[in-house]
Image (cartoon, coloured by chain):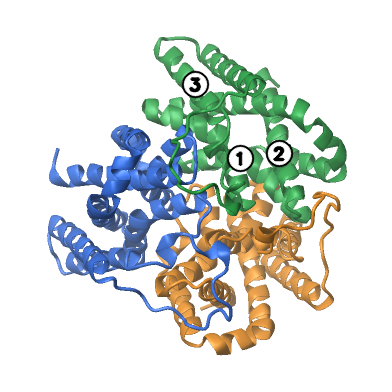
Chain colours: A orange, B blue, C green
Amino acid sequence: MDLIQYLDYMGTLAFAASGALKAVRKNMDLFGVGVLATVTAIGGGTIRDALLGERAFWLGDPAYVGLALAAALAVFVLFRVVVREEARGLLVLDAIGLGVFTAIGAAKAWHAQTGIVGVVTMACLTGVGGGMLRDVLAGDVPAVLREEIYASASLAGALAFWVLNVAGAHEAVSAGAAAALTITIRLLSIRFRWRLPRRIGGRARPPAQGDQS
Amino acid sequence: MDLIQYLDYMGTLAFAASGALKAVRKNMDLFGVGVLATVTAIGGGTIRDALLGERAFWLGDPAYVGLALAAALAVFVLFRVVVREEARGLLVLDAIGLGVFTAIGAAKAWHAQTGIVGVVTMACLTGVGGGMLRDVLAGDVPAVLREEIYASASLAGALAFWVLNVAGAHEAVSAGAAAALTITIRLLSIRFRWRLPRRIGGRARPPAQGDQS
Amino acid sequence: MDLIQYLDYMGTLAFAASGALKAVRKNMDLFGVGVLATVTAIGGGTIRDALLGERAFWLGDPAYVGLALAAALAVFVLFRVVVREEARGLLVLDAIGLGVFTAIGAAKAWHAQTGIVGVVTMACLTGVGGGMLRDVLAGDVPAVLREEIYASASLAGALAFWVLNVAGAHEAVSAGAAAALTITIRLLSIRFRWRLPRRIGGRARPPAQGDQS
């Protein structure tokens, strides 16, 4: 098993854990925990494949769903332990997942010959699509639409992949650089609490109750 | 028209009725009632087909959308009558729909040669995906993620299909057994109020207002 | 660039603006504004293509995503100006977008040989699917499910396309008539405040808080 595959599985576990945590917090039953974990882990790549007109990637490798369900069960059983680690280990694992998923999505779109718009959108979709589905299914507005430097890190990585590949770099180099850049930006943004600008004055009133996702 | 086709249409009507009922309760207009009925009836199979990289099944047979719209109109006009029957006849029809959709999804994934993960996920998606779309569009957290033995019945049926097919059973036998098992578990779970376990303590506070879907 | 392409781009801008406006009002950050604008502009056609088993249309023409992002940035920067124009110019642009998207969706489904159900559903999906995604991602029940003559205008246009095409009209004529009919109905419905019927008594209580989307 090569490195990229190993990191891909690790990202799958981290994303699945974030879905399972949300499901437990939303008072879902065991089935809901398994579904939300799986959707978070494979949802982004699944949307990407559907938009490319291809079969979902995880149909060819049962390990993805298997790992997601294992992570769901672990979170369900070890909820208190996982929560304690959430702010430390999980955020790092999640950042690695974001970087690897971004690189994989970019590479897949590149091979499907979609141009820069396709490479960037497919890379970001692979990175953040699962988390968006998780939030929508849990009844929340996707956190990625208004919080933190998360999708932006994926975006930067995707652009790096495209620039390097067009410049003639070996694809493994482009993918590695994309993942590394994404992970670095994400971790720095957590450490230093970076934020994207908002349009102040978009709403005259303070945020309503339903807006705290 | 063979039996499976007949049951498939019946399930379509039952699922459409559940979507239409929800739409009326959510104060939607006639168009919304038609859309929610149709999405509930054909949404699961549509997602399945998209994930398999195939064209949506109902494009080849106008009866599905036609039946869904007919059910929507009937619910709209006969709302009070339908509501009265909801807890009795509709639940049984819905269980039959769940079983038949599960069997159809499993068979379709089997023919697409997706392995056990594909068979089980596609079977469950066909069975519960439409209801999940219905709930998301209506602004609710999908009921299937935290209520009752519903998706679990579909899951059991899907596994039964796979085991029987691998064991060499005739596909009609596997499909029939899958549907029968799903329907039986679902009806028994309603009768005896079975529940899946939850992780108590997932939330420190009692459920917030927005959580009662 | 021919007329239909020009109108298609204009509709893309108008739809993107409506998504960006909603994102700013929901207090999303710059990334969220870009995503919601893009999803609103290309979401309907993207779902259509996925259901037809084809690759997403915008992968072949970077202008769509580029225009959507430009509209998002313009709304973000010129928020107050855009809001002032919203009730006038934007509604007209949006109606034109609805009409053009409907005609394009109908034509695409016709060429994919889907029959009347496919033509009508794909036309409506292209017209209203992006707005539905926008509302779901923003945490609202899709406005199109309970407000105004919007989807119905798209539906009428789709039927007109099908009738004319079956009657042997040149496709440009059918598409033009479909777009014109959709736009006319939509604008008239705004002017005269038409509404679709609802099922009074669907709910015993007045609408709950979460229901005002």
Please say whether residue A64 is visible from this viewpoint.
no
Q: Name the residue type under label 1.
A: Gly
Left or right: where does residue C122 sit relative to residue A92?
Answer: left
Q: Looking at this view, name the residue that lies furthest to the front.
A: C205
Q: Position of residue B138 (x, y in %)?
A: 50, 49
Q: Which label sits on residue C156?
A: 3
Asked which quadrant contains residue A193, the reply is bottom right
Q: Which residue is mark 1?
A: C131
Query: Residue flagged by tag 3: what amino acid is it?
Result: Ala
Q: Residue at x 64, y 82 (%)?
A: A86
Residue B145 to residue B20: above or below: below
Left or right: residue B27 compared with residue B86? right
Q: Chain of mark 2?
A: C
- Tag 3 or tag 2, which sits nearer the N-term? 2
Which residue is denoted by mark 2 in the rendering? C18
Same subunit, labels 3 and 1: the answer reads: yes
Q: Which of marks 1 and 3 precedes in the sequence?
A: 1
Are dots 2 and 1 in contact, CB under 8 Å? yes
